[in-house]
């Protein structure tokens, strides 16, 4: 079997529902999020996914466990480099209440898109190497996944990443952008 890799955004949390920036704050899934994860697992059944990994945050770990349970798939250790973007002092705030001025004033305290790519791309390539021949799903987070997705597409896409959304990773493109960004030495 050929190696495959996909990213999955965790299920909904109460903070997602309220429009709060979670970032690295460790929030658990709500009932809707648990339902989303189980439903996604049932949808993915029979598609050959055999390894579920996740960021160390509870919402991602819970999502991975619920999907794996539906698939009868193996789970593995947490992948810290695929955690959510750090939103610094904005974490816990309702996004709609943060003014453009306030966001600009704290911009230097937020993790940049380049920093996300610098930690995430090598991790994804390492997972592919370590688990060659397997179909790997990694449960991650909206801002991290959007940054990776946009880098793979070569431009910023207008839409975000929804809870429970799956993004298939083109492994050849992943290697190309990692090399182009001088993030890893292949």
Image (cartoon, rainbow, N blue to C red):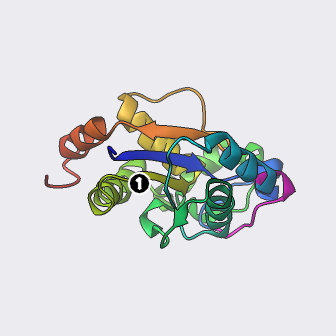
The x, y position of residue 38, in whole percent, is 74, 52
The x, y position of residue 149, in whole percent, is 45, 37
The quadrant in which residue 175 appears is: top left
How many callouts does the rendering have? 1
Q: Does the magenta stretch include residue 26?
A: yes
In the visual, does 159 lie left or right of 6?
right
Q: Which of 19 and 146 is in front in this view?
A: 146
In the visual, does 81 lie left or right of 54?
left
Could you tell me which quadrant the N terminus lies in?
Answer: top left
Secondary structure, mark 1, is helix
**Principal secondary structure, stretch drawn in magenta:** loop
The x, y position of residue 100, in whole percent, is 63, 41
Residue lying furthest left: 186
The x, y position of residue 21, in whole percent, is 68, 55
Q: Is residue 173 above or below residue 3?
A: above
* Residue 109 visible in the snapshot: yes
Q: Is residue 10 magenta?
A: no
The quadrant in which residue 128 appears is: bottom left
Q: Nearer the viewer, residue 161 or 109?
A: 161
Q: Which of 10 and 88 is in front in this view?
A: 10
Residue drawn at x 68%, y 65% as measured from the top left:
62
Q: In this view, does 48 lie above or below 77?
A: above
Q: Give the range drawn in magenta.
A: 25-33
Q: Is residue 18 above or below residue 47?
A: below
Q: Which of 142 and 91 is in front in this view?
A: 142
The quadrant in which residue 13 appears is: bottom right
Q: Mark 1 points at which residue?
A: 116
* Residue 54 visible in the snapshot: no
Residue drawn at x 54%, y 59% as measured from the top left:
84
Residue drawn at x 65%, y 55% as measured from the top left:
67
Q: In this view, does 169 lie above or below 116?
A: above
In the visual, does 16 lie left or right of 182?
right
């Amino acid at each position: 079997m050929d190696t495959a890799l996909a990213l999955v955004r965790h299920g909904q949390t109460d903070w997602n529902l309220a429009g709060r920036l979670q970032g690295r704050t460790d929030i658990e899934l709500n009932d809707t999020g648990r339902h989303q994860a189980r439903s996604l697992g049932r949808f993915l059944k029979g598609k050959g996914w055999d390894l579920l990994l996740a960021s160390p945050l509870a919402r991602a770990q819970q999502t991975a466990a619920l999907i794996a349970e539906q698939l009868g798939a193996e789970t593995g250790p947490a992948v810290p480099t695929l955690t959510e973007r750090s939103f610094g002092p904005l974490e816990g705030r309702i996004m709609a209440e943060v003014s453009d001025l306030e966001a600009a004033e704290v911009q230097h305290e937020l993790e940049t898109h380049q920093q996300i790519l610098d930690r995430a791309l090598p991790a994804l390539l390492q997972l592919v190497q370590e688990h060659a021949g397997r179909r790997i799903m990694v449960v991650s987070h909206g801002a991290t996944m959007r940054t990776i997705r946009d880098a793979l597409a070569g431009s910023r896409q207008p839409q975000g990443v929804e809870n429970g959304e799956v993004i298939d990773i083109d492994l050849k493109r992943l290697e190309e952008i990692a090399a182009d960004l001088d993030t890893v030495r292949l």
